[in-house]
Amino acid sequence: MKKSNFVALILGTVGIVFFALGMCMALVEEWGMFQKGIIAGVVGLIILLITVIVWRRMEGKSPIRLNAKTVGSVLAGVLGALLLGVGMCLCMVFDKMIPGVVVGLAGILALLMLIPMTKGIHD
């Protein structure tokens, strides 16, 4: 394993743990830790952003440039993840199976569209 991948693995794991724990702290009302959970979640997101920057620098890649394709890809990913999550909530929380499956499939299709959007279609 390359050093850059190992560093990204460690930083990514720490960032995801902070983010996930922060979201649990914020969303589980019984814990009563909403503000602390938001802080922990933001710390996790900052660590994940640092992970991307450090990994790209260690790999010798140029920084990510914001252009229409990058912004569109991020928006498509966020939209797809939100649709998938809403579909799961409709199925599991609100007991609306058919609408939940339809919305979840729309989210999966949006996420699948990221592949040709970012990599393109080649022969």
Image (tube, rainbow, N blue to C red):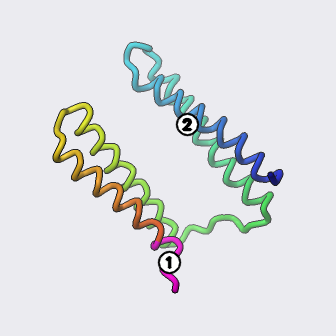
Question: Residue 67, image x and y in percent?
Answer: 53, 72
72 displayed left or right of 11: left
Q: Is residue 93 left or right of residue 120?
A: left
- Left/right placement of residue 49 relative to residue 8 reads left
Q: CA distance from mark 2 to mark 1?
A: 33 Å
Residue for badge 2: 42
Residue 66's tag is none
Magenta region, residue range: 116-123
Q: Is residue 97 above or below residue 120?
A: above
Nearer the observer, 89 or 26: 89
Answer above or below: position of 114 versus 51.
Answer: below
Number of residue marks: 2
As drawn, the residue found furthest toward the front would be 123
- Taking the magenta stretch, the answer to whether it contains residue 86 is no
Q: Residue furthest right?
A: 3
Q: Which mark is residue 120?
A: 1
User: Residue 53 at x, y = what percent?
Assistant: 70, 54
Name the foreground residue: 36 vs 97: 97
Disc 2 crowd rating (10 Å Cα; few below 14, some 14-19, many 20+) is: some
